[in-house]
Image (cartoon, helix red, strand yellow):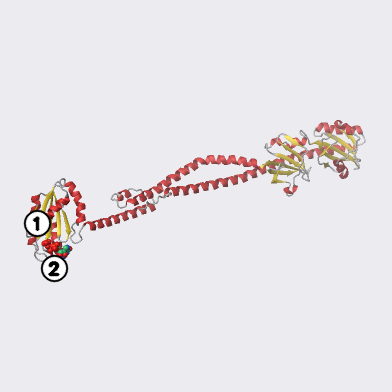
Amino acid sequence: MDQPRRFAFNLKRLILVLALVSTLITLLSSYLAIFQVEKKLLIESSLRASQSYATRISLTADLFFNAAQKQLIYSASLLGEEFHNLNAVTDEADRLQVQSKRYSSVLVVDKSGVVRAASRNSADMVGIKLVSDANTQALSTQNPVISSPFRTPQNNHIIAMSVPIHNARGKYLGYLVAEITLQQGGIIDSLVNARNYRKDAYIYVIDNDGDVLYRAADGWTESAPQGNVNKALLEGRDQGYLHMKNLQGEDSLTGFSTMEVAGWTVLVLHPARADVVLLYDVMLQVLLYTLPFVILVFIGIWLLTRSISRPLRQLASKADTMDSEDVSVEIEQVNAWYYEASKLKTVMLQGIHLLHQRIEKLSTQAHTDPMTGLLNRRGLYEQADKLLGEASQIGVITLDIDHFKRVNDAYGHDVGDVVITQLSHLILNNSRKDDLLCRMGGEEFLLLLPGTSMAQAVQLAERLRCQVEMQDFEGAGKVTISLGVTHFNPEKVNIDSALKSADKALYQAKNDGRNRVVSL
Ligand SMILES: Nc1nc2c(ncn2[C@@H]2O[C@H](COP(=O)(O)OP(=O)(O)OP(=O)(O)O)[C@@H](O)[C@H]2O)c(=O)[nH]1
């Protein structure tokens, strides 16, 4: 017979796998959603922080340039009155340079571009004709100018702030210019002061063309970096934030703000990957915080799965032994705590009840003679086993209707059946509860009488014979029977030889003329 197929999956495993997979998917998608939201928030807050730092720098720079310009305008008004007094002009230039300390040098330039006077630290400049763009711009516009950075013949990297000088009648005499160094330690450097912001940030100052004038990071300053920022990226805004590449080509979160006075833009950049690294730490924390709950959820799922699958597993295991006698009791004990399991349990119990009824009916049919209701030969052997184990002596009577063929021939088969049935009733009426009564076939009967001696068996046989002889059988009238009697101890003699003896006695009774009892 084929072996029943072994299933790799059972309900418990299926539910467990399903629950675990869906929980994991939910967790992963939650983590992913948290990651995305956090990333967005973190990047946005970084961008805002960069923007506000850029704004702070540009506002401070505006304050500085405004104050410086006012100071220069005031001095220019004084110089306009005493432009021809060389000593006074030199004193004023020197005063400006010494007092403010913001300027590397202060020059008074006439309208032909020649340095008329200078602060004392730049006295060697007096008489020199300036050729820088800053000079040309100051002379041509005759307005306050903040120049683009440039290098002096002494190789100083500077910007020049100039204001025009007019005399009392408003005639243009030249201009007053203060040079401001861009080198480390200068005023711009202290305004930008990258040390106050995050360590990985770069601060760029770009001019109107996007050329990087100045670049600073934690601990260092570069006052003439090579590089250009595409100003179109700023979309014409004065301030805001955006993603852009820094001079190293890294994707950077960038906040910017444009100075009102100088027209330069301050950009504060830092690499986006730094924030993502930070986010990984945050996510690790989230994971560590949620891990105990996740483990608890998994344990809960496992317990629930076990609890759901157990009644079904127990019921399924009983399906193999539905024909066993105790199976109903075992099924009764299954704790079917939810609807489907309970329904299944009820149906199984009903099914088992019907099955047992059917089995019992079939068993009865297989072991009894349908016409008389007595045991048949198979039934006798089955029941006899029990009897043989319990009784120490057993009486045996075998009996047969005399000339029964004639009854059939004379009155018909149906009348013959009635005679057989009536005889079986008569035998039944004369037997005890523990006696085994069997119709061995045709009109032959066998009685096994536990705890019955030979004398008692002969006595019963004689009683049966007399009662049959006396009885009127329906449709057939009088009939007689012959009986063979024996007796055996089941521990010493086996049942087959006992039955043979009884048959032999019956045979003798027939030969001796019938309607008699013979014992052997
Ligand atoms: N009506 C009826 N007849 C049966 C049944 N079983 C067997 N018989 C008949 O019983 C008769 C038995 O005949 P025999 O074995 O020759 O014996 P007998 O005629 O009884 O003669 P002795 O036994 O020698 O006295 C046969 O005619 C069978 O057909 C049954 O269930 N119903």
Disc 2 C-beta below 8 A from ligand 1: yes
List x then y, in percent, for residue 265.
75, 43
Mark 2, other Cα within 10 Å: few <14 / some 14–19 / many ≥20: few
Q: Which mark is residue 409?
A: 2
Residue 287, visible in the rendered structure: yes
Task: Choose between 246 and 1: the one closer to the eye.
Answer: 1
Distance in Å between CA atoms under marks 2 and 1? 25 Å
Dot 2 or dot 1: first in sequence order is 2
Q: Nearer the viewer, mark 2 or mark 1?
A: 1
SS state under label 2 = helix
Q: Quadrant of ligand 1?
A: bottom left
Compared with residue 207, is residue 186 higher up or lower down, i.e. above or below? above
Marks 1 and 2: in contact by CB < 8 Å?
A: no
Residue at which label 1 appears: 508
In depth, the one of 29 and 465 nearer the eye is 465
Say which quarter of the image contains residue 258: top right
Measuring 9% from the left and 56% from the top, which residue is drawn there?
508
Q: Amino acid at mark 2?
A: Asp
Judge from the rendering whether residue 319 lies leftward or rightward of residue 241; answer left or right. Answer: left
What's under tag 1, amino acid-wise?
Answer: Gln
State the image coordinates of residue 454 (x, y, percent, origin top left). 9, 50
* Quarter assignment of residue 414: bottom left
